[in-house]
Amino acid sequence: MVRRVLSLTSGRIALAILTVIALLALLGPLIAPHDPLATTDNTLADASGSHWLGTDYLGRDVLSRLLDGSRVSVLGTLEVALTALGVGAVPGILSVYFGRVFEWITLRLTDTLVALPFLLFAVAVVALLGNGLTQAMLVTGVLVSPLFYRVARAATLAVARSPYVEAALLSGASIGWVVRRHVWVKVLPPIAVALAQTIGVGFVIVSTLTFLGIGIQPPAPTWGGLLASDLGYLSQQPWAPLVPALLIMVTVWACNLLADAIRDVSGEAGRALVDNRRARANRLADADADADADADADADADTDAHADAAHVHAGGA
């Protein structure tokens, strides 16, 4: 699947952007030119050689805060996506095989999670458990998990009635073996699409919560927190919110682009794409072979013409 994704221009663009964001999360705090928490008297300064993106209302370097906050934003997003994947996909697959009672319970829990007001529930749980990033992201991941439950359940239902799956069950294979051997391979592509989309949604959720001061408290830098602090000083720095907003927007766009690329190369569409590429490659190879044959024929014709001309000239002499 990775090779198919990389064969698409959209897939290469999305992976390149997400690779840069991942490198920012890994290396951002190390390459930050200044201490992101250090305050100075040079407040609300414009961009300069020492402060490429200027300083904020406390004189802190904005670039350093963006680089340092990228790790928190990316880790929070991954916590949301992986929690949603674990809580939603596994019960979604098992609900097809564990009987009507388990299916009914999981469906009702999913409906309940969908009906909960997301932001109010997240605020209530954080107030109960404490204002920490892990608590906020775990709660958020559970609230997002119905997406994975429905995707995994629908894909498993499409495979569960296949002849080879029924044959495996009739031959005495365990449910775990059938899921690992037959079901997971078919369920993986739609789950991968949902995961890429959820990572994009996770960036929006993390930025929203940190914008409101939930999960991470100032002065710890986050993209959403930087956006919130910049909005209070638009009269002095009207361009300041553009950089964190652009980072969030580009990251979410890359996640959605990656989800579209995975969808395009998986299933019947993926096989059709591979077949079209092979047919195009064969046509190009045939065209090159025909061109080479024509060139060889022209060369032979020229050689024969020169030979005939030389023979006539020799006979006349």
Image: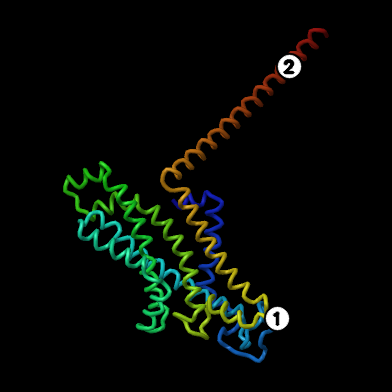
Q: Quadrant of the C terminus?
A: top right
Of residue 276 and residue 227, the one placed in the foreground of this image is: 227
| Tag 1 and tag 2, C-beta contact below 8 Å | no
Q: Residue at x 73, y 16 (%)?
A: 305
- Rendered position, 287 above or below 173: above
Q: Which mark is residue 305?
A: 2
Which is nearer the N-term, disc 1 or disc 2? 1
- Rendered position, 310 above or below 50: above
- Rendered position, 191 above or below 170: below
- Rendered position, 103 above or below 292: below
**Image quadrant in which you'd find residue 270:** top left
User: Residue 194: where, in percent of width, then height?
Assistant: 42, 58
Q: Nearer the viewer, mark 1 or mark 2?
A: 1
In this figure, which residue is indicated by the disc labeled 1? Answer: 46
**Image quadrant in which you'd find residue 150:** bottom left
Residue farthest toward the right in the current orientation of the protein: 317
Looking at the rendered structure, the kind of residue marked 1 is Asp
